Image (cartoon, rainbow, N blue to C red):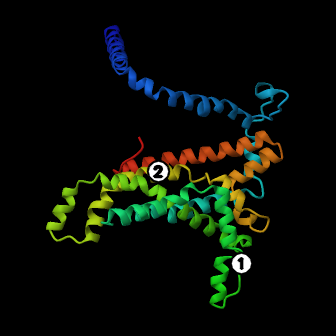
Amino acid sequence: MKPEGIAARAASGGGRWRRKLRRATVNYELYLFVLPAVIYYLVFHYWPMYGVQIAFKQFNPVLGIQGSPWVGLQHFIRFVQAPSFLDIVGNTLGISLYSLLVAFPAPIILALLLNEIRSRKFRRVLQTVTYAPHFISMVVLVSMIMILLNPTYGLANTLLAAFGAEPIDFMTRSGWFKSIYVLSDVWQNAGWSSIIYLAALAGIDPELHEAAMIDGASRLQRIRHINIPGIMPTMVILFILAMGGVMSVGFEKVFLMQNPLNLEASEVISTYVYKVGLLQVQYSFSAAVGLFNSVINFVLLLIVNGTVKRIGQTSLW
C-alpha cells in the first residue's frame, strides 16, 4: 500500500475516534447511567475468569493459582473417560430438552390466552394467580412437591386410590424425575415468563386486528396470522438464549429433589460439580467440568444464532 493510502486510512480512523469521543462527551449522562452495570459485570463476571486456569492445573491452595503446576487437559480427559460421563450428560440434556419442549411454549400459550380475555378485572386476577408461584422459595416448592406426591397421604396418590390404582412413590422412581422437575417448573415460572410475551403482544398495532375483523377473520385466525408473527422475534431471541443454556440445569431444585433411589436420573453436571468440587475438594477437576459445560453452551449458542440468522429470522448479533 502506498504511503498516501496509509496516511489517509490513519486520518480517517483518527477522525472516526474523534467523532465517537465527541458523541460520548455529549451523552455522558447515559454512559454514567450504565457505568455501575459495566463495573458489576467486570468485577463479578469477567475478573473471576482469571481463576478458570485452575482447570488446566493441579490446584493446591497452599501454592495458589500461579504456583500450582500445569497438567494440560488431564482433568477434561478424566471427566470424558469417567464411567458416569454419559449418564450425567444424558440426564442434563434430557432435562433441558424436555424443558424446551414443554416449558418453553407454555408461557407463549398462556400469554396468547390471557391476551384474549376482554374483562380487565378477570385478566388481572388470572395474571396474579399465575405470577404468584414464581415468588415461592425453591425449598418450599420442593417441600410442596414431596407432600403432594407422598405415597401415603399425598393428593396425587389419594386421587389414584380413588380410582382403584396402587400408590406410587414418585420421588423414588427414576422414570418420574424429569416429568416432576419440568412440570413443576412450568407451574412455577410460566406465568412470570409470559410477561415479556404480553408486552410484545401489547406492541402489536390494533389496526391490524381491526382490518382483519372487517375482512371476517376469526379470533383463531387473528392469533395465527397477527399475534404469533408479532411476537415471533421475541420468541426467537428467547429460544436462542434457552439453547445457550441447554447444558445448565439449575442446581438447587435438582439437588433438593435428589435422593439415592432416583440418582440414576437426577445426577446432572451442576450437582456432580458440587459433589466433586466442594465435598471431595477436587477444585481443578470440578473447574474443568464446569468449563466443559460452559464451552458446550457457548458453541450451541453460536450454532443456533448462526442458523437462525441464515434463515432470515431475528438473531442476537
Asked which quadrant contains residue 267, the reply is bottom right
Which residue lies at the image location 62% right of the left edge and 68% below the top edge?
Answer: 180
Asked which quadrant contains residue 225, the reply is bottom left
Q: Tell me the number on the disc at residue 195.
A: none
Residue 300 appears at what percent x and percent y?
53, 49
Q: Name above or below for residue 193 compared with residue 14.
A: below
Instruction: Give the residue at the far left of this rendering.
Output: 214
Which residue lies at the image location 59% right of the left edge and 57% below the top edge?
Answer: 136
Residue 192 appears at what percent x and percent y?
48, 56
Residue 194 appears at what percent x and percent y?
43, 57
Crowding at label 2, few (<14), some or many (≥20) Cα neighbours within 10 Å? many
One can see residue 223 in this view? yes
Q: In which quadrant will I find the N terminus?
A: top left
Q: In which quadrant will I find the C terminus?
A: top left
Crowding at label 1, few (<14), some or many (≥20) Cα neighbours within 10 Å? few
* Cα distance between the residues tagged 2 and 1: 42 Å
- Earlier sequence position, callout 2 versus callout 1: 1
For label 1, the residue is 153
Q: Name above or below for residue 248 compared with residue 101.
A: above
Q: Give, as a three-letter code, the residue at label 1.
A: Tyr
Instruction: Give the residue at the far right of this rendering.
Output: 62
One can see residue 114 in this view? no
Q: Which of 118 and 221 is in front in this view?
A: 118
